[in-house]
Each structure stands twice: as C-alpha cells, then as structure tokens.
C-alpha cells in the first residue's frame, strides 16, 4: 500500500491542524499523538502507531 493511500484527507487535515498550531515539534511523535488525542483525532493517533516511517516521509517531503 502506497503512502498516498495511507494518509487520507482526514488524517492529512489533522496533521496540518497540529502543525499549524505550532504546539510541538512534528518529529516528536509522543507529543504529536498527545495533541491529536486532546483534539479527538483518534485516526491520527492510530496512524502514528502503525505508520511511523510513512508519517516521517510525509513530514520531510510533504508528499502524500
């Protein structure tokens, strides 16, 4: 399964909201997960548990 199939529009929007808030370093996965959980972004919490490599690739390149 390619990364474009993993990062759904919903997960993409959730990542962008957290990124734009500036509340944490986007490579600090525990903090990103904490913020996602606080906002009710449970899909993102699960995604980060299961797809760390794909998440890091997205943060580095911006490619979905």
Image (cartoon, rainbow, N blue to C red):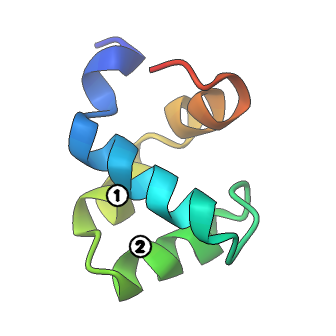
Question: Could you tell me residue 44's position as x and y percent?
Answer: 34, 58
**In the image, what residue occupies the spot 65% across and 37% down?**
59
Q: Are marks 2 and 1 in contact (CB under 8 Å)?
A: yes
Q: Quadrant of residue 53?
A: top right
Q: Is residue 47 depicted above or below 32 in this figure? A: above
Gap in Å between the C-alphas at discs 2 and 1? 6 Å
Image mark for residue 36 = 2
Image mark for residue 56 = none
Q: Is residue 21 depicted above or below 10 in this figure? A: below
Residue extending farthest to the bottom is 38
Dot 2, crowdedness within 10 Å: few (<14), some or many (≥20)? many
Assign the N terminus to one quadrant of the image. top left
In the displayed structure image, the side of residue 41 where residue 38 appears, left or right: right
In the displayed structure image, the side of residue 47 where residue 60 appears, left or right: right
Q: Is residue 62 depicted above or below 8 in this figure? A: above
Question: Could you tell me residue 33's position as x and y percent?
Answer: 49, 71
Question: Is residue 49 visible to the viewer in this orientation of the structure?
Answer: no
Q: Mark 2 falls on what kind of element?
A: helix
> Could you tell me how many numbered marks the image carries?
2
Residue extending farthest to the top is 2
Which residue carries the number 1 mark?
A: 44
Q: Is residue 32 depicted above or below 35 in this figure? A: above
Dot 1, crowdedness within 10 Å: few (<14), some or many (≥20)? many
**In the image, what residue occupies the spot 49% across and 51% down?**
16
Question: Is residue 60 visible to the viewer in this orientation of the structure?
Answer: yes
Question: Could you tell me residue 3's position as x and y percent?
Answer: 40, 19
**In the image, what residue occupies the spot 36% across and 80% down?**
37
Q: Earlier in the sequence, mark 2 or mark 1?
A: 2
Q: Quadrant of residue 36?
A: bottom left
Q: Mark 1 falls on what kind of element?
A: helix
Q: Quadrant of residue 12?
A: top left
């Amino acid at each position: 399964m390619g990364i474009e199939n993993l990062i759904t529009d919903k997960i993409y929007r959730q990542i962008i909201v957290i990124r734009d808030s500036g509340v944490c370093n986007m490579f600090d996965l525990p903090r990103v997960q904490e913020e996602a959980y606080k906002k009710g972004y449970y899909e993102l919490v699960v995604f980060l548990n299961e797809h760390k490599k794909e998440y890091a690739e997205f943060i580095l390149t911006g490619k979905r």
